[in-house]
Amino acid sequence: MSAKTHRLQFPLSEADARRLRAGDQVLLDGDIVITAGLPTHERMVQCLDSHTPLPMDLHEASVFHLGSYSREVAGGLEVLYINPTTSTRFNPFMPRLIRHFNWHAVGGKGGLDQASAQAMQEAGCVYLSFLGGGCTLLSQAVQSVLQMGWSDLLVHYRLVRLRVQGLGPATVGIDASGRSLYEEQVQSARQRLGDILAHLDRQRQLGANSA
C-alpha cells in the first residue's frame, strides 16, 4: 500500500493516530508541545513520582523533541526557530510518559526503541520524524507561543506550547500498530551485513594481490 499524505489537527486524536501508517506524510495544524531537554524529561518523571502538578496539562498532548532558539520579550517568549533533536536520548522516559499522559503523537528525529513502540501501540500513538536540519522550513509554521513551563530551565529545555500551521511534512516513523521504519532498517542492515563484509573482504584481497 502506497504512503499517503495527511493534513491533521493537533493535538492528534487517538482515532487519527490509529489511521496513520508507517511511511505516511503528515502536515500539522494546531497546538503542540516542544522540548529538547533531558532534564525536562527527568523532571516530568519526578513530578509523576512525587504527585507534583506539571506547569501545563500534558494529558493527550502532542509532544515533540524539537529544539528551539528563542528570546524572552515583553509578555512572553518569541520562538525564532525550531529544529528536531534526537529522540533516542529519551528512551528511558518515554514509555512511562506515553502511558501516563495518554499521548497520541510524539516525535523528533532518530526514532524510539521497542519499549516505547509497545507503549505507543497501547496508547494509540505515532512517532513523527521531522526533517533534520530543516529549521527554516519548520520554523515558518510557528504561529504563536501559547504557554511556557519551567522558566528556571534554559529556554531550549522548557516546555513550550506552540500553535503551528502546516508544520512538516513529517514522516510516520512508528505507527500505532507497532510498525517501526527504524527497526526495519536495522533488520535489513543486519541481513545484508554478511554480504557487505564478504564484498569488502574480496576488495581487500584484490588490492593485496595487485600490490
Image (cartoon, rainbow, N blue to C red):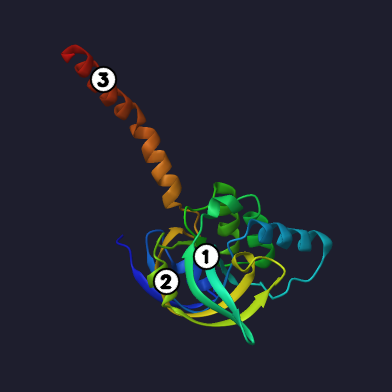
Could you say which disc has been placed on residue 204 in the image?
3
Q: Amino acid at mark 1?
A: Leu
Q: What is the C-alpha distance between the residues marked 3 and 1?
A: 43 Å
Residue 130 locus on image (x, y percent): 43, 63
Residue 207 image-quadrant placement: top left
Q: Residues within 10 Å of mark 2 (few under 14, many from 20)?
A: many
Of the image marks 2 and 3, the number of the one nearer the N terminus:
2
Residue occupying the point 53% across, 68% down: 68
Residue 16 locus on image (x, y percent): 48, 72
Residue 187 against residue 43 in the figure, above or below: above
Which residue is nearer to you in this view: 12 or 146? 146
Residue behind mark 1? 66
Direction right: furthest residue: 50
Q: What is the C-alpha distance between the residues marked 2 and 3?
A: 44 Å
Q: Residues within 10 Å of mark 3 (few under 14, many from 20)?
A: few
Residue 148 against residue 209 in the figure, above or below: below
Residue occupying the point 60% across, 56% down: 119
Q: Is residue 70 left or right of residue 183?
A: right
Residue 22 locus on image (x, y percent): 41, 58
Of the image marks 3 and 1, the number of the one nearer the N terminus:
1
Residue 44 locus on image (x, y percent): 71, 62
Proximity of marks 3 and 1: CB atoms separated by less than 8 Å: no
Direction left: furthest residue: 210
Q: Is residue 179 left or right of residue 205?
A: right
Residue behind mark 2? 138
Q: What is the C-alpha distance between the residues marked 2 and 1?
A: 10 Å
